[in-house]
Image (cartoon, grey):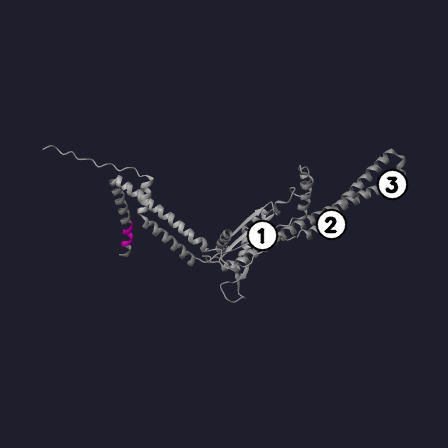
Amino acid sequence: MPDVVPIAEPSPGPLTLALWTAGVLNRWRTVFLCTIGAIILAVVAALVLPPTYRVTVSFAPNPSSSSKIGGALSSLSSSGALSGLASGMGLGSVGGEPTESPAFYGELLQSRELLTRLLLTKFKDPRTSNPNDSARLVDIMKLRSTDPKRRIELGVKVLEKSMVTTADPRTNLVKVVVSDQYPNIVASKANAALALVNQFNLEQRTSRAKSKRVYMQSRMADAKVDLAAAQARHRDFLSRNRQWQTSPTLSSDEETLRRNEDVATELYLSVEKQFEDARLDEFNDAALITTVDSAVAPVKPYWPRYSLLLPGALLLGLFVGVMVAGIATIYADWSRRDPAAAQQLRAALMRRAARAKAPTVARRA
C-alpha cells in the first residue's frame, strides 16, 4: 500500500487593510459598547463635577509723564537718534518704560504677591444664604489642607490655572479670562484682580514720582548753594576791585566770575523747574488703569456645554472602540500565525495576575 503524503495547510496570508477593516466590523459590539460607555461617562461627569463659569475683563495701562515724553521723542525721530537723549534724561527706552508695557501687567497678574493678596481678599460667601456673610477667597476655595501656609500655596497654584492673561502690545490691551464654580465669585474675583493691579499701579508710580521729587529737591538745594557761592565771589571781587575795567587781568577775572554766576543761575533755574515738574508728576502720575470691560456675573455656565459634550463623547467613544477592535483584530491575526507565542503570552499574563491576587487573599485571611 503506497504511503499517503500529507497535504500541508496553506499559510495564512498577510493582514491587509481590508482584512483589518472586516475584523473591526465583525467586532461592532465592542465599538458600540465603547461609544455608549464614553457617553455615559460624559453624562456622569457633567452631573457630578461642579459647573464652571467664565468671565473676561480687559484694561489698558495709562502711560506716565516720562513715557509720554519718550513717545513724543520717538515720533519726532524715526531713525532713533533721540533714543540716547531720552535715556540720558531718565526717560528709559524711547516709547515707554518696561513696567508700563502690557506684557508686564500680564506677568503681574500671575505674580505670587498679587495672587496672595487676592486670596486674602474677602468676598460674599456663596455657600450661605445670608447676603451679609463674607469670607476670604482662600477659605471659600476647596483646598485639601489645614495648614494656613500650605493653603496659600495651593490657592496660588489654583488661581494661576484659573486666570489666563493675554497682552497685545499693538493695542496696549490686557485681557484676563477668569474661571470659577460660583458665578458671583468669578465676577468679583476678576474685578478684585483689576483693583489690585490698579493699587499696584498707584503705589508704584507714586513711589517713583516721590523719589524723583526728593532727588530734585536735594539737587535744587545744592544748586542754590552753588549759586549763592558764585554770587558772593562775584560780589566780593567787585567790592575789592572798583577800577577793574582799567586792568586786562581784572577784566578777565570779572568775566570768568560773571560767567560762572550765569551758569550757576541757569542751572538753579533748570533744576527748580524740574523740581516743580516732579511735584506735579507726583500727583499726575498716580494715573489709574483704564478698564475697558469689567466683569458681570454670568448666567450660563461655560461648562458643561452639552452641545459640545455629547458630540465630543460620541466621537471619542467611536475612536476608542475602533482602536480596541483594531487591536483585537491584530492580536487575533498574530495568535493565528504564531499560536505557541500567543499561548506563552497568555500563560505569563495569568501567572502575573495570580501573583497580584495572592497578597490580597492573604490579607483577607
- Sort mark 1 into few (<14), some (14-19) or many (20+) by Cα contacts within 10 Å: many
Q: Quadrant of residue 85?
A: top right
Q: Which residue is mark 3?
A: 240
Image depth: mark 1 or mark 2 in front: 1
Q: Look at 40% across and 51% down and name the residue there.
A: 314
Nearer to the camera, 178 or 303 = 303
Q: CA distance from mark 2 to mark 3?
A: 38 Å
Q: Residues within 10 Å of mark 2 (few under 14, many from 20)?
A: some
In the rendered image, residue 307, in percent from the top left (x then y), is placed at 45, 54
Mark 2 or mark 3: whose residue is earlier in sequence: 3
Q: Earlier in the sequence, mark 1 or mark 2?
A: 1
Which residue type does callout 1 highlight? Ser
Location of the N terminus (image quadrant): top left
Residue type (three-letter) at the residue carrying disc 2: Glu
Q: Which mark is residue 276?
A: 2
Counting from the top left corner in percent of width and height, residue 130 is at 52, 67
Is label 2 or label 3 in front?
2
Give the residue pinned by disc 1.
58
Q: Most extreme residue toward the top, as rendered?
A: 2
